[in-house]
Amino acid sequence: MAQERRKIWTITVAVIGAAALWAVIGLWQDYWCDLNDDALILHILNGSYTGAPESMDIQNLYPLSALLSILYKAVRSVPWYQALLLVCQFGSMALIAYRVLCACGKRAAALMVGLLLSLMLWHLVFVQYSVAVGFLCTAAAVWILTVPQGAFRFRALWPAWALLWLAYVLRSEMMLFMGPFVLLAFLYRALQEREDIRKILVRCLCAGAVLVAGIGLLEGADRAARRSPDWQEFTALFDARTQLYDFQTIPPYEDNQSFYDSIGISGEEAELLVNYNYGLDPDMNAQKMQQVADYAAQLRIRDKSVKERIRDALWDYRQGFTARAELPYNGVSICLYVLCLIMAAGESVTARRRRSGRRSDLLDFLYVCGLFGARSVLFLYLFYHQRPVARLTHCIYLAECAALLFLLVKEVHERKGFTRIYAGVCIAAFAAALIVNVQSVNAECERREETNIPCEDLYDYEREHPDIFFLTDVYSTVSFTDRMFGEAAPLNQDVLGGWACKSPLQEKKLMLFGISSMEEALTQENVRFVSRTDYDTGWLTAYYRSKGVNITLVPETVIDEDLTVYKVNRN
């Protein structure tokens, strides 16, 4: 009974601590949607995109988006999606602290919280759903690592599986990307069990089968929801667009005219791909987008062989260990690896003196090697595809550093030695990382505040003209980012491209204003075009000219000298 009360008290302390941290950060800075992706998901779910909460937000799997849409329909005023992301991040921190506290004591839990805060402060303020998945997967790995000896059974693992299922419906690709860290934790704990190897193997296979079965059910539900022809066409377009814009370089028309001509894309239409405004072209479909993506991939291989790309990836990976741009993340990671090596060396010397050794020492060493191998493969994959974006690399640092720190505090807890030395080094590293992150968060918040001014004024202008629909050049407002708890974007606006372009949701939104095609709509009386004042709009007049239509862009309103609202007239 006393043990149960202590468990409840420990959970309560962890939850209260996470809530207090959330409140302190919220008082210090606003919470922001890190990218426009998160803002658009939010607008789709809460109804500000199409006028009603939607059960399919494109990015998340259907079981999650359907549940969130039901919640929004029930109580529209509650920020359900924002709450989900914050719970994923701060809840993961609370869960990690609770498990480490139970396994290794209060000092170890305090060190772990210090690591998570100092390493991920930026992402606690600038929230991104991919990073939320990184938190969930890290929490799942720590849960597995802290399963008590002799209790490695499914009833002890199911919370970790639940975290992984939630991560999968939030963003499946990111969950699979972080999967190696969870798999390593699972193998490490399984091998620690002092039981017959056949029993352990059967238990692991059963647990793995349950995890895979759950993922299969979630994936099946999502595919069933997207079975309509409209959604299948858009899904194919979305996948092709991701390949082209995230992993390739759009081939310039001048050097690849014969290819573009062969698939029926003119120079003016190719320019729409370059400036991301391909929604203006009614003929751009999944097949054409995939052809361009495949051709761009071929050009990339032709320009640089696989061997050369691997060599470049290895060089970039090597440079990343000391790159200033990767501070403080690489510094904390190196510090923890060094401490683990020092501890391993000290244990090896002690074991030789005593002429004894522990099986767990070898497992710890292999686990550290496995962590380094997993992070190396993932980093090389990102460098190979020239995609080392922070929301991916920082999650790698998060997972490996949490695992390394747990190994350190576990060994110190078990052997009762060198506590002050290791703790002092860790505290110094975490404090330095926290200082760097506090400074960068302050600077970024100031930058976003200033950058957002013209876009916020544009939103006000759009709200003042509810009968007019505004179509915006994509790159003119791409730097605008939403506050998580700010005012929703106006219904009467959309961009000419982006990842929701040509989706059934966008078609529904446009139909509310009687728009069946962006190309036709742009010259209608109740539609305006928005672009940065200093941007050349010649691409737009050239596109219409290629369609046999001459237009004139008449500036109607200039907003903060940065954005211009144009009336597009047919000549």
Image (tube, rainbow, N blue to C red):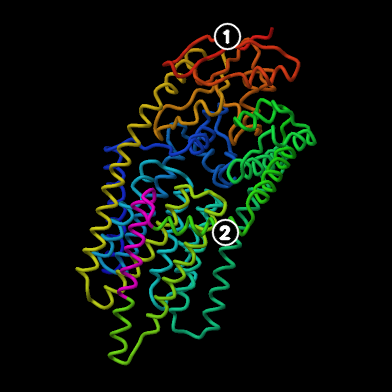
Front position among marks 1 and 2:
2
Q: Is residue 354 above or below residue 366?
A: below
Q: Which mark is residue 171?
A: none
What kind of residue is marked 1?
Val
Residue 323 x/y as whole percent: 39, 52
- Residue 126 forms part of the magenta stretch: no
Q: Is residue 510 above or below residue 315?
A: above
Give the residue displayed 43% in from the left and 45% down from the top: 85
Residue 445 x/y as whole percent: 34, 35
Residue 41 x/y as whole percent: 52, 37
Q: Which mark is residue 554?
A: 1
Q: Is residue 144 left or right of residue 423?
A: right
Gap in Å between the C-alphas at discs 1 and 2? 51 Å
Q: Quadrant of residue 208?
A: bottom right
Give the residue displayed 52% in from the left and 14% down from the top: 565
Residue at label 2? 310
Residue range in magenta is: 322-343
**Magenta: main secondary structure:** helix
Q: Quick one: 112 or 154, which is closer to the camera?
A: 112
- Local SS, label 1: strand
Residue 1 in sight in this render: no
